Amino acid sequence: MAETHEGATRRDFIHVASATMGAVGAACVAWPLIHQMNPAADTLALATTEFDVSGVEEGMAVTVVWRGKPVFVRHRTRQRRSKRPTRSTSTIFPIRRPTAIGRASPRC
């Protein structure tokens, strides 16, 4: 029979060793599955674009390409900014008021 050393047996060692090997095997299987979810290098390269806005002077418009699409950068003049229409938040985020029955009224 197996000799016991301070309460530990060979069976305990086999259980610990097999559990450790099972955990390592699961990690080896899971690693490629998780790694495939990362974005590809070409996608990461297109994801960032740096543009120095300090070079854009007042009244100037610049077009920058980001992810293959144009992004328009404009430095408006004070006169142009003052002509900007003001909107209240109620027109941007309309509140649906409940009707007398208790249901929300449909947007018309």
Image (cartoon, grey):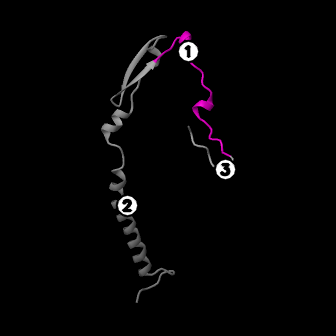
Which class describes the residues within 10 Å of circle 1: few (<14), some (14-19), or many (20+)? Answer: few
Q: Earlier in the sequence, mark 1 or mark 3?
A: 1
Quarter holding residue 45: top left
Pointers 3 and 2 in contact (C-beta within 8 Å): no
Alpha carbon distance from label 1 to label 3? 43 Å
Q: In this view, does 28 lie to the left or right of 85?
A: left
Label 1 is placed on what type of residue? Arg
Residue at x 55%, y 15% (from the top left corner): 81
Quadrant of residue 64 within the rendered picture: top left
Question: Distance from label 3 to label 2 (Cα)?
Answer: 54 Å
Instruction: Confirm whether the magenta stretch covers residue 18.
Output: no
* Residue 23 locus on image (x, y percent): 40, 66
Residue 81 is labelled as 1
Residue at 39% across, 31% down: 48
Taking the view exactly as shown, the residue that stands out farthest to the left is 42
Tag 3 residue: 102
Specify whether 27 is left or right of 91. Answer: left
Local SS, label 1 = helix
Decide: few, some or many residues near mark 2? Use Cα within 10 Å; few <14, some 14-19, many ≥20: few
Name the spot of residue 17 as percent of width and height, x first. Answer: 39, 72
Foreground disc of the pair 2, 1: 1
Residue on which the image places disc 2: 27
Which label belongs to residue 65? none
